[in-house]
Image (cartoon, rainbow, N blue to C red):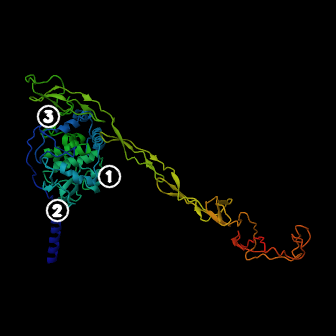
């Protein structure tokens, strides 16, 4: 018995824990100090970084007017009277195939000029989710808890996918800042990926944000076309009835309207179901509640969308319907500058006293993409392809034309490391190297030296004399190497008879007839000049004086000088 009791208690605790895990960590009624704004003219935008608008609204303060930027957004083919004339669905299942669904989707998609990244949103929340332009703090989506606007790596707050990733997201839709909201960490873990709804298997975020949640998921449903995961426990919303109920019970507040302005300044598009909740009922073929408060006021006015207004209720004609008012105080309203792709509007001349349109404005044609620039151009190199770059509009950032690939070019080469050979040293033909990228296209070769000189003729540099040496030189015609040699002294003394002899040689006398010479007088062998036979003239003494000299081959010879001396 006790065992069964313990089992029963375990089951009860499990149920309690399960139910508790689905209960939101949120405040029952989230409110902040009201702005007190009652019309678009009260709103004064604060810009940051030159282009981003901060959220000017207050939580819990019902929005009873369209903001200035909302009025400018819905002009031309985007006006309520034009779009509401489109046929919606007749049920929850037929809405996606209706003309109204496609028209709303086309509008929000066409104006979505910048798609946020997941990392980028961390630094944009200080603008989108602050309260009353206080960018130092942000308001946690589900609870309204005031958090620091500075990202702290998820310690205090993180990013809540109001449409969970596991429910059909998988591209730019999962990073859309319109859907991705900052939440206190306890809130995010409390919900998980449970679908919104009122039953036991659903997540109820609390009455202060039920309408917010409904309008966000409806935006993703239409803008991104995520229709297969919209309904039931496997989707993000219990059913169409709960969605419309939440939207009616929790009307748009100025914080939602301010956030729509802030998001538009980042992405270019708006959540149409915040500005005109009436479209939700038209989309599913339901009757718009007559006592529902909406920013445009159309629901309470009973307007079926088939009026002459271009901006939610203005008559748009030149004959004001209130003859009692003199319309002396006028202002220009709903003016909108033309952009590259969107028409502008000169604005309506409105009476500040009665609100009538004294004179309707006219459309301004779109300017077209006149101011363009090329981005992402890459110059081709020898080894890498280049890119001509994409052409963008400098005004709106639209990519007008994709660039083309530039083929890699040929190498711009030059010879490096060239060395001419000499007669005795090898040379080098040089490497073929690309001057642009430094790639060695072709390696050079060794140029072998011939190994000998190619000399020209000897040239006398210094003439030799009888007693001094001379010199001569010759040059190689290839490497200009010079070779020098000594010229020996001539050994000739002016006025004397000389003759060269081999080194260490001495002159000796010859006996008559021994040397085979003839007498200069008689011509007989052995005869001397005096005619004596076989004898030496006693009056002649041979004196030999040896003068050494250096010959061309380095030898030493003796020069014998004969001189006659009388006894």
Q: Which mark is residue 19?
A: 2
Left or right, 163 with reference to 444: left
The residue shown at (86%, 74%) is: 515
- Quadrant in the picture for the C terminus: bottom right
Residue at disc 1, secondary structure: loop
Residue for badge 1: 171
Q: Find residue 360 and report its image quarter.
A: top left
Front: mark 1 or 2: 1
Classify mark 1: residues with Cα within 10 Å, few (<14), some (14-19) or many (20+): few
Marked residue nearer the N-terminal end (3 or 1): 1
Q: Nearer the viewer, residue 331 or 381?
A: 381
Residue sitting at 25 percent across and 29 percent down?
363
Labels 3, 1: front one:
1
Q: Is mark 3 on a helix, strand or loop?
A: helix
Asked if residue 116 is positioned above or below residue 470 in the image, the reply reads: above
Q: Residue at x 19, y 62 (%)?
A: 155
Q: Where is residue 73 in the image (x, y as percent from the top left)?
A: 23, 37
Q: Which of 390 and 289 is in front in this view?
A: 390
| In this rendering, position of residue 508 left or right of residue 168 | right
Mark-to-mark CA distance, 3 and 1: 40 Å
On screen, residue 290 above or below 407: above
Please name whichever residue, 451 or 58, is drawn nearer the observer in this view of the structure: 451
Looking at the picture, does residue 208 appear above or below residue 334?
below
Residue at image location 16% in from the left, 22% down from the top: 319
Q: How crowded is mark 3: few (under 14 residues within 10 Å), some or many (20 or more)?
A: few
Marked residue nearer the N-terminal end (2 or 3): 2
Circle 3 sits on which residue? 301
Give percent across and percent down for residue 33.
7, 48
| Rendering quarter of residue 334 | top left
Identify the secondary structure beneath mark 2: helix
Residue 290 x %, y %: 14, 38
């Amino acid at each position: 018995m006790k065992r069964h009791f313990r089992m029963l208690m375990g089951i009860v605790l499990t149920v309690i824990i399960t139910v508790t895990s689905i209960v939101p960590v949120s405040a029952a009624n989230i409110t902040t100090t009201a702005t007190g704004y009652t019309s678009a003219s009260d709103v004064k935008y604060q810009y940051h970084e030159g282009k981003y608008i901060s959220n000017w609204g207050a939580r819990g303060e019902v929005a009873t007017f369209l903001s200035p930027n909302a009025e400018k957004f819905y002009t031309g083919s985007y006006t309520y009277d034009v779009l509401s004339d489109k046929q919606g669905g007749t049920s929850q299942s037929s809405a996606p195939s209706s003309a109204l669904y496609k028209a709303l989707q086309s509008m929000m998609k066409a104006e979505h000029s910048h798609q946020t990244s997941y990392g980028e949103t961390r630094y944009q929340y200080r603008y989108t989710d602050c309260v009353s332009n206080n960018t130092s703090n942000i308001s946690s989506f589900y609870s309204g808890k005031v958090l620091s606007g500075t990202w702290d790596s998820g310690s205090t707050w993180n990013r809540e996918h109001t449409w969970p990733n596991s429910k059909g997201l998988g591209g730019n839709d999962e990073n859309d800042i319109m859907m991705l909201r900052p939440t206190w960490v306890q809130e995010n873990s409390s919900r998980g990926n449970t679908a919104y709804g009122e039953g036991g298997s659903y997540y109820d975020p609390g009455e202060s944000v039920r309408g917010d949640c409904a309008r966000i998921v409806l935006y993703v449903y239409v803008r991104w076309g995520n229709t297969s995961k919209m309904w039931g426990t496997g989707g993000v919303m219990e059913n169409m009835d709960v969605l419309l109920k939440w939207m009616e019970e929790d009307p748009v507040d100025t914080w939602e309207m301010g956030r729509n302005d802030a998001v538009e300044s980042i992405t270019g598009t708006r959540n149409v179901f915040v500005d005109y909740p009436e479209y939700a009922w038209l989309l599913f073929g339901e009757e718009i509640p007559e006592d529902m408060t909406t920013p445009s006021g159309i629901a309470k006015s009973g307007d079926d969308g088939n009026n002459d207004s271009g901006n939610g209720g203005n008559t748009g004609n030149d004959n004001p319907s209130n003859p009692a008012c003199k319309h002396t105080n006028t202002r220009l309203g709903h003016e909108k500058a033309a952009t590259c792709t969107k028409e502008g509007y000169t604005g309506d001349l409105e009476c500040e006293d009665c609100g009538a349109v004294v004179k309707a404005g006219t459309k301004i044609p779109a300017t077209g993409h006149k101011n363009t620039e090329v981005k992402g151009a890459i110059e081709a190199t020898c080894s890498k392809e280049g890119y001509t770059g994409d052409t963008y509009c400098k005004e709106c950032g639209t990519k007008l034309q994709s660039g083309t690939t530039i083929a890699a070019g040929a190498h711009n080469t030059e010879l490096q490391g060239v060395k001419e050979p000499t007669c005795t040293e090898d040379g080098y033909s040089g490497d073929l190297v690309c001057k642009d990228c430094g790639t060695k296209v072709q390696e050079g070769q060794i140029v072998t030296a011939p190994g000998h000189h190619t000399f020209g003729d000897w040239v006398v540099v210094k003439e030799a004399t009888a007693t001094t040496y001379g010199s001569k030189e010759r040059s190689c015609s290839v490497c200009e190497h010079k070779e020098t040699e000594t010229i020996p002294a001539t050994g000739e003394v002016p006025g004397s008879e000389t003759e060269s002899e081999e080194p260490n040689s001495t002159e000796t006398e010859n006996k008559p007839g021994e040397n085979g010479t003839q007498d200069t007088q008689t011509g007989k062998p052995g005869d001397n000049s005096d005619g004596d036979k076989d004898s030496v003239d006693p009056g002649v003494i041979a004196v030999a004086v040896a003068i050494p000299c250096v010959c061309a081959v380095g030898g030493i010879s003796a020069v014998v000088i004969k001189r006659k001396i009388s006894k």
